Image (spheres, helix red, strand yellow):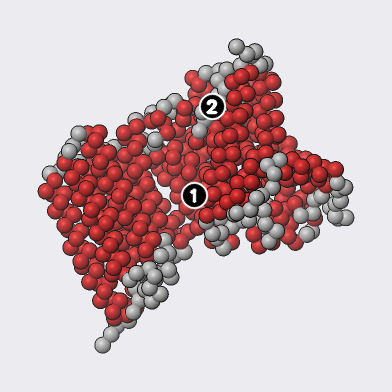
Amino acid sequence: MTTALLFAGGTAPLQPPGVYEGAANVIAALMLLLEFGMLRQALVRDQIRLYAAQSALLSVLAIVIAADRNLPDLYALAALSAALKVVAVPLVLRRLLGSPADEDAPGIAGSYTLNPASAVLASIGLAAFGFFSFGQLHIAGPAAPALALAIAAAMVFVAFGLMIVRRDVASQAVGFFSLENAISLAALVVAAGLPLILETAFLFDLLVAVVVFGMLIRAHHARAASLSTADLTRLKG
Amino acid sequence: MSAALPIPVIQLLQVLTVALGAPGVTGVIAKVEARLQGRRGPRVLQPYYDLAKLARKESLAPEQASWFFLAAPLIAVAAYLTIPLLIPVLTTYGLPLGYMGDILGGGFLLSLASFVVATAAVETGSPYAQLGSSRAKTFSAITEPVVLFVVFTVALLTGTDLPYALAATVRSGAGQVIRPAHLLASAALFMVILHETGRIPVETHTGTNEFGMIEEARSFEHSGPYFALLKWGGELKQLILFTILADVFVAPWGLASTRQAGAVLLAIVALLAKACAIGVVVAVIDNSFAKLRLFKITEYASAAFLLAVLGVFTLYLGGG
């Protein structure tokens, strides 16, 4: 009995997108999954680790696109982005939030406004919204498949969700940085041929954000001795 | 070179492979697990000896229990032995009885077996057995949506919901393997299997600690040959789930594509090797993660659900 016979009777199966597109899509999907991982992570150092992993995947995707579409600029971008987002930003964040061995280092474990399962379900809804609204736009870049763009949109929404459901400054900073990852992913998909100087400028924007968030975390920690934003609701004279 | 086997013989061999191989796979996993924990562990053949010993023992039933209490293990094993007819165990081509049911048919049979065992456990009036069946039913309701979404993914990928069709699709090229929908659905199914075989996240599958008992607690009141059937049923269920994961989703290679006796024999060996490999992975995962508190199971189920839902999403946009 042949496969053709097995397929008879059903609707036609979807055609596979090809190995290159498949790999790019898988990397994008993994980045989205890591975003969900950050959403439910209870320890700040694990959250930072997930952010570093997500940034590393972004660099891998840049390399995959560079290799397949022959865009040598992207190799430089991947290296720069990895140096900054896989090494520097996590290092700075870890320094700001105290060493993991430090018992007094403030935690973020109790900062959920929803329980993790509900937060994930709600974020699936958000991701679906991002997904299908961008899917309707039918934007196809020269470099990467349209699905990766929709995944980037879903990531943006989930990153917003992360900043909303977690009531602590550390998660909100990580959420903001991963938002930048999502936008970089979208940029890679839509405009992989963007001049290197522009991409580099975006990366420096991230540096500004890190400095600002770093100062905010420091100031908040010094005043409230915790990372929770719940302390900010009371007015102080 | 070797003689072609008649189709009914191959069909029978599918059932026999699962029926006779299941305790062996359980034995290998138990051995590996013991080694991971620094113990010498039981013999690989120990589950066979256990079954043989139980089969010789006297069986008792609680006074109030009806005939159903004793019928349940038989029905459960019958259901488990029907499933290997529906899924690709040894062959790439569908066998005649393979079209009796699709993936949902297999799912219904698994649920039927679990339902009759739970009902028999409730009949006994024993609190632990009832607790176990109540938990098993509640948690299977939580993981059910995941399974449904995995089936949806399969349906979108192949245009059918026949397990043979998905296996053929996966074999057809690398493009079918490296696509988010396939990987996400396989990962979600793997998470469900970890839960269903009593590993992660809350259950201790070998333990006698009542708090960690779900599936094990249900057979508390059975004894003798009936208990042997229930134990065998648990082992069958494990091998069936591993077979579905390996031969339909993850590694549908090594199956016989002809009726040659040699190819079929090779397929039997390949299936058992694949099942043992999955078992080793499962044992490593089981022993390297802490168990969750019972009510945290929703977090685990939501993670699996996320994978399955994303799989369907990616397909809807065409690129998955």
Identify the residue position indicated by label 2 in the image.
B254
Q: Is residue A96 above or below residue A48?
A: below
- Residue drawn at 76 percent across, 55 percent down: B220
Q: Are marks 2 and 1 on the same chain?
A: yes
Which amino acid does the dot numbered 2 rest on? Gly
Percent position of residue B37, x then y: 59, 54
User: Alpha-carbon neighbours of circle 1 within 10 Å: few (<14), some, or many (≥20)?
Assistant: many
- Residue drawn at 83 percent across, 47 percent down: B224
Percent position of residue A142, x then y: 21, 35
Q: Which mark is residue A142?
A: none
Identify the residue position indicated by label 1 in the image.
B304
Which is nearer the eye, B311 or B247?
B247
Position of B304 compared to A95: left or right? right
Q: Tag 1's secondary structure?
A: helix
Which amino acid does the dot numbered 1 rest on? Ala
Q: Earlier in the sequence, mark 2 or mark 1?
A: 2
| Quarter assignment of residue B201 | bottom right
* Marked residue chain, label 1: B
Q: Which image quarter holds the C terminus of chain A?
A: bottom left
Q: Which image quarter holds the N terminus of chain A?
A: top right
Position of A143 compared to A49: left or right? left
Position of A109 compared to B130: left or right? left
